[in-house]
Image (spheres, rainbow, N blue to C red):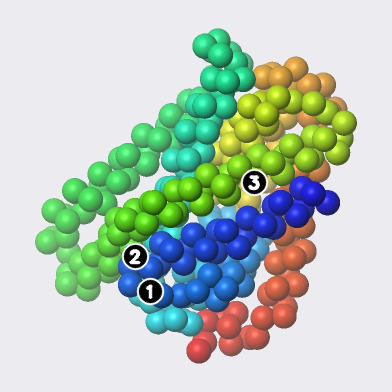
Amino acid sequence: MLALLVYYATFPLRSWRWSVLLRTSGARVSWRDLLRILFLGWFVNCIVPAKLGDLYRSFLVKQRFGVSLSRTVGVVVAERLLDLLVVFVLLIVGGYVAFGRTFLPDLRVVYLTGAALLVAILVALVAVYWVAPRLARFFPREVRRIGRLFREGVLHSFRALPVAGPLTVIIWSCEALRLFFVLTALGLDLPLSGVVFVAVATSLLTTVPLTPAGFGFVEIAMVYVLTEGFGLAQSDAIAVAVVDRAVSVLSLIVVGAIVYVRTPHEERVGRR
């Protein structure tokens, strides 16, 4: 129950962060107005692949509040980039505290995945900031306009780092706390640094858009890290993965479905 409580407490925080990021793009939307849309987007992410829920919530913001879709998608991309940056930092810090300077070969894939994502983030930012404006002149005016709005959505969002950065750290601290409560409920003990490491290491795979909410990838990764990195029995590791995903995914499918059904049809399809 505490794991559920902590998990759902992150949604108002995510909604608040989203409203802060949108404000840098000139869209003043309150976090309360965004909360329902955020739930709907995450619900869609849990049942369809390719992170289509992020595109869906961007579309709903455009239709309901008149914010450019390209700009809103850019803000959502910046939000995801900020998540990945904080996750990578917590991965390194948690791994260093948990294992010291010892590099465990069994967890090499985790560090390589994190490093690859960091490189991808840096390449993406360079492409958005430097490459895209130089290529824009080769495209029609409308395409240039869409690209400009998307670029502004991404880059302007980072002006909100003084507020969005600490909020992101709090959000991911709550994610680690959720896993701590799951472990405690199962009578398992892991050092705090280990809890942080497992929470962020497995969350990296939710960025793989091949399956809804990373189904299959995340569970296997969690069992792998818990057994190879921290010596848990395989049965205990499987139990942790099942309970944690029940809290973070299965419960969200139920709650999200309720929110979807209770949302007026006009709002679900983006009509004002």
The residue positioned 58% from the left and 20% from the top of the image is 97
SS class of the residue under badge 3? helix
| Coordinates of residue 1 in the picture (x, y in percent) | 83, 51
- Near-viewer residue (138 or 62): 62
Query: Which quadrant holds residue 42?
Result: bottom right
| Residue drawn at x 81%, y 43% as measured from the top left | 243
Q: Secondary structure at mark 2?
A: loop
Q: Residue at x 37, y 41 (%)?
A: 121
Do tag 3 and tag 2 residues touch (Cβ < 8 Å)? no
Give how far across and how far down residue 113 sits, in percent.
49, 30
* Amino acid type, mark 2: Thr
Amino acid type, callout 3: Cys
Residue nearest the observer in this picture, 211 or 257: 257
Q: Are marks 1 and 2 in contact (CB under 8 Å)?
A: no
Relative image position of residue 191 (x, y in whole percent): 70, 24
Mark linked to residue 27: 1
Q: Which residue is mark 2?
A: 24
Examine the image and state in which quarter residue 20 appears: bottom left
Q: Residue 181, located in which quarter of the rendered image?
A: top right
Callout 1 crowding tier (Cα within 10 Å): few <14, some 14–19, many ≥20: some
The answer to whether one can see residue 136 in this image is: yes
Looking at the image, which is closer to me, 157 or 53? Answer: 157
* Marked residue nearer the N-terminal end (3 or 1): 1
* Looking at the image, residue 81 lies above or below residue 258: above
Question: What's the amino acid at mark 1?
Answer: Ala
Residue 201 in the image: above or below residue 233: below
Q: Which residue is mark 3?
A: 174
Is residue 241 in sight in this rendering? Answer: no
* N-term-proximal mark, 3 vs 2: 2
Q: CA distance from mark 3 to mark 1?
A: 28 Å
Residue 138 higher or lower than 105, as above or below = below
- How many angstroms separate mark 1 from mark 2 (CA)? 7 Å
